[in-house]
Image (spheres, rainbow, N blue to C red):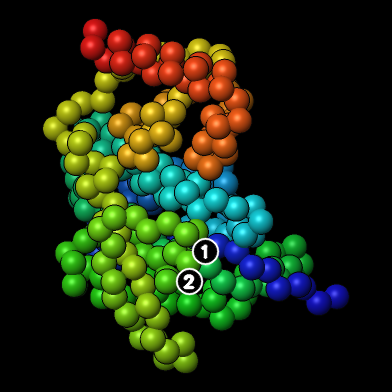
Amino acid sequence: MASETQHGYLVLADISGYTSYLAQVELEHANEILTDLLAVIVNQFKQALTISKLEGDAVFANINESGMPNGERLLELIESTYFHFRRRRDASQRQTTCTCRACQSIPSLDLKFFVHHGDYIVQDISGIRELVGSDVNLIHRLTKNHITEQTGWHAYTLFTDRTLEHINIRPEGLHAQTESYEHLGAISTQSMDIHPRIIASNEGHPEKEIARRAAGDVVGEMSLISGDTRIASVIALGDVRVLCIDRLNFESLLRERPEVSLAVMRELCKRLKERSN
């Protein structure tokens, strides 16, 4: 039975500096460190994507476009994944007492994302699931690019123009660049430096608890209203069930339900008081 062609997002998270790191460090400790970091990426991706394959220094995932109707969720997932990757990487560096080259070289590792919207077929052979198609080849070829040479960035998200057309969002500070590949031709891309978006406001400042939330509380409403990047992250202390709402549905809810708007205003006033104390 022939597999049907699917249309959706292909996402590849690739650990920067992996090849040089592996070439000059002790393999045993390096494997433990990289396995730990890859697990962080997988755990974040699994919240919204289907993990297609682990590829040594990379995690390849996908989602049918019907499963990601709002591109903003995809951008949030990438930012969240990078935040958790950096937090885990930096925590590992701080906590280690080992003086081997693998442990001391942890800061050389960073993370890049590649996002493409295209067609693919899910091939299942003897229980082994794999994505195939020209667009699958393309996203892997995109990892060989000239972004770092042109910009100096080691942590970035690369979008194909087709992706940005589908998510209908254009983040600020995009770097336009065309890459050429044999059999695929010229590919127009837009890249975003993700390091300052997540790290700049936190560098030099230790993490600290600023508030605690309980069952029924709302989080993230300020970012939805302002459109700005979140300035804090929520860490669950146990198992939780979360109802997620994107900006479009949130704004629609505020227009249709005045009582919800009033409740949000009260919550914002309470949060502002918390910050001033």
Disc marking residue 166: 1
Residue 177 spot, x, y in % from top left: 29, 75
Residue sitting at x 37%, y 58%? 170
- What is the x, y in percent for residue 147? 26, 70
Q: Residue 198: which quarter of the image? A: top left
- Residue 24 in view (yes/no): no
Query: Residue 27, percent across and down?
Result: 33, 55
Residues marked 1 and 2 touching at CB (< 8 Å) = yes
- Residue 203 drawn above or below residue 276: below
Location of mark 2 (residue): 162
Residue 50 position (above or below residue 118): above
**Few, some or many residues within 10 Å of mark 2 (<14, 14–19, 20+):** some
Residue 4 pos. (x, y %): 76, 72
| Residue 119 image-quadrant placement | bottom right
**Label 1 is placed on what type of residue?**
His
Q: Residues within 10 Å of mark 1 (few under 14, many from 20)?
A: some
**What separation in Å lies between label 1 and label 2 (alpha carbons)?**
6 Å
